[in-house]
Structure formats: structure tokens, C-alpha cells
Image: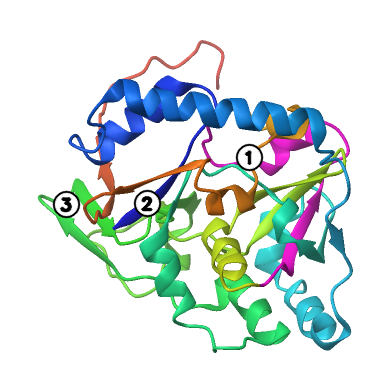
């Protein structure tokens, strides 16, 4: 697969480590790669002195998709996932969107593009953005002895969704041994995967859906629909959460020249490397222990 990897976003050591991790032969002359990174860093610093990015990059949705988009917000899963802060649909300027992701899987983006009509309508774009309406990617599960499980998926969005203690009568479709009195259920699966961005200090930082935004921008669409989460202060960012990135979440709202989606289309700011196809794995190891505990005095 082909990856477009950002240049110029600190720290350089993370960039070098990432290149080595995807292809030990791609780095070649390490000094030359670091020099390219330095040149990109200089370019970004110069742009930070001359370009004002603190201008709101979103507007209301076009009328032809407003009703369908609002219907999506009535989904209880949307409320549970995003309800810690105010949220709404917006029509965003993709060229001004800040991105956390340090690379784009160009091969995956091309697969997404193949699913769109040649001249996509606003409704087509909305349905791309509403990732939770798409079929879930396939996965496999293997168990060695009932206590060790390996879940494998083509998507790195596969995760543990929830762990909950339930009354056994609420667990359907399985008959356990004995007389059960408690059940602990672990839910695995995928996030809602709606393309969303956090808005604070006049900036939009994309927290999910980078490949879909890349796909739209590559197809010549300068604007598209996006779910916007409103943060009024930095402490709200901990409620929203963000995927792992090169810098702390708040840095992307403060730095003079943050990484933008459009940077992936600037040859001075990306390095293209080829990496083997990979699968994403989640391992579960269950351990049980029993012991005797002393009853506190006076407890009945």
C-alpha cells in the first residue's frame, strides 16, 4: 500500500521511527530524509508568519441535505457518542481543516473514491460522511482455550467498545453451564465512524474521517459536510477525546501553522512510501483468581 506521510511536524524522531516501522528499507539515507523534514519545517514556519488560519472554516449545510442530516442526529448512538459537548452539522472548507493524522493511506483512499459516483451530489457526500450507515468491515476471532482470544480486522477502527456487568437473563442466544447469577459482557466492534471535527478558537480540527476528507478533496471538492463538535475551552477537549497524534490535542488549536488536509497534496510537505498490507489485531487474555477474604468485624 502507498502512504503519504507528513513532513515538518515535530518531533522529527517520530517521523524517522514511523518510516522505519513501515519499511526498514524505505529510509535509505537517513540524513537525506531528515533534511527533507527540515525543509518542510522551514516552509511551515514561514507560512505561519504570513497566513492567518484563525477564520471559521464552516457554514450551514446546503438546503438539499439539511433534512436528511438532521434526521441522523436523532439516532440515540449519536447522542451517546457525542453528547458531552454541543454538536451540529456544517458545510466545511476542506482546504482549511486541520488534521491530526500523520499519514494517509492513499491506497485505501482510492478504494473509498471508487465507491462514489463520478460526479457526486451533496447527498452522496453526506452518505460518505455518515460512516455508521456503511456495512462493518469483516473480522475474524480465534480462541485457544476459552481464555485467550484474538480478534483480527482489516480496519484499525476495530476496538473494545464497552464492558458491562449484566443479569444473565439479559444475555440472549447462549445457554451456559450451571445456574448463572452474573455475566460480564465485552463488546467488540467499530466506532460510529462519522466524519467529525472539533471547533475551537476559530479552527476546525478533524478528529475522525481523514481518509474521506482526503478523498473528497482529491476529487476536486473544496467543501463538504461534517459533524462539528463545539469546544468553548481547553477542558472540553478531554470530553471529546482524540486519536493518538504527534502533538497534544490542544497544540493543533494554538500553533501558528498547524498541519492541514491540503498539505497532503503539497509535494514539499509529504513523503510517499510503500508499506506492506497489514491487519489490525486485538488480543484478549482472561485471568481468574479465587481467594478467602476476612469478614470485617461488626459487619453483621
Label 1's element? loop
Location of mark 2 (residue):
3
Location of mark 1 (residue):
259
Q: The magenta stretch spans which residues?
A: 221-247
* Mark 2 touches mark 3? (CB < 8 Å): no
The answer to whether residue 253 is visible is yes
**Mark in front: 1 vs 3:** 1
State whether residue 125 is above or below residue 79.
below
Q: Quadrant of the N terminus?
A: bottom left
Residue 25 percent coordinates (x, y): 18, 36
Location of mark 3 (residue):
146
Label 3's element? loop
Of the two numbered discs 1 and 3 on the same chain, state the one appearing first in sequence: 3
**Mark in front: 2 vs 3:** 2
Name which quarter of the figure residue 48 lies in. Answer: top right
> Can you name the residue that lies furthest to the top here?
297
Residue 36 percent coordinates (x, y): 44, 30
Q: Is residue 228 magenta?
A: yes
Q: CA distance from mark 1 to mark 2?
A: 16 Å
Residue 111 percent coordinates (x, y): 40, 73
Residue at position x 52%, y 28% in the image: 39
State whether residue 98 is above or below residue 214.
above
Task: Please state which of residues 152 and 14 is positioned toward the viewer in this rendering.
Answer: 14
Name which quarter of the figure residue 18 lies in. Answer: top left
Q: Is residue 5 magenta?
A: no
Q: Quadrant of the C terminus?
A: top right
Name which quarter of the figure residue 80 lies in. Answer: bottom right
Amino acid at each position: 500500500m502507498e502512504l503519504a506521510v507528513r513532513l515538518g511536524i515535530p518531533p522529527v524522531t517520530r517521523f524517522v521511527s514511523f518510516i522505519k516501522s513501515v519499511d526498514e528499507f524505505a529510509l535509505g539515507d537517513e540524513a537525506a530524509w531528515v533534511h527533507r523534514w527540515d525543509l518542510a519545517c522551514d516552509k511551515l514556519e514561514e507560512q505561519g508568519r504570513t497566513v492567518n488560519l484563525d477564520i471559521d472554516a464552516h457554514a450551514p449545510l446546503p438546503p438539499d441535505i439539511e433534512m436528511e442530516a438532521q434526521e441522523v442526529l436523532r439516532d440515540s448512538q449519536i447522542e451517546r457518542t457525542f453528547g458531552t459537548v454541543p454538536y451540529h452539522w456544517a458545510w466545511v472548507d476542506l482546504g482549511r481543516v486541520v488534521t491530526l493524522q500523520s499519514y494517509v493511506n492513499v491506497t485505501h483512499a482510492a478504494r473509498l473514491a471508487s465507491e462514489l459516483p463520478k460526479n457526486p451530489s451533496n447527498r452522496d457526500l453526506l452518505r460518505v460522511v455518515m460512516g455508521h450507515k456503511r456495512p462493518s468491515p469483516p473480522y475474524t476471532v480465534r480462541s485457544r482455550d476459552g481464555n485467550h482470544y484474538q480478534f483480527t480486522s482489516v480496519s484499525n477502527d476495530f476496538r473494545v467498545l464497552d464492558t458491562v456487568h449484566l443479569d444473565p437473563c439479559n444475555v440472549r442466544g447462549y445457554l451456559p453451564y450451571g445456574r448463572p447469577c452474573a455475566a460480564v459482557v465485552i463488546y467488540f466492534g467499530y466506532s460510529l465512524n462519522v466524519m467529525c471535527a472539533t471547533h475551537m478558537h476559530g479552527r476546525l480540527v478533524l478528529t475522525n474521517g481523514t481518509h474521506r476528507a482526503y478523498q473528497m478533496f482529491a476529487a476536486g471538492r473544496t467543501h463538504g459536510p461534517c459533524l462539528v463538535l463545539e469546544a468553548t475551552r481547553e477542558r472540553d477537549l478531554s470530553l471529546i477525546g482524540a486519536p493518538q497524534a504527534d502533538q497534544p490535542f490542544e497544540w493543533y488549536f494554538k500553533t501558528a501553522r498547524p498541519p492541514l488536509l491540503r498539505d497532503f497534496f503539497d509535494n514539499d510537505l509529504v513523503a510517499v512510501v510503500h508499506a506492506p498490507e497489514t491487519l489490525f489485531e486485538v488480543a484478549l487474555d482472561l485471568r481468574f483468581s479465587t481467594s478467602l477474604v476476612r469478614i470485617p468485624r461488626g459487619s453483621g
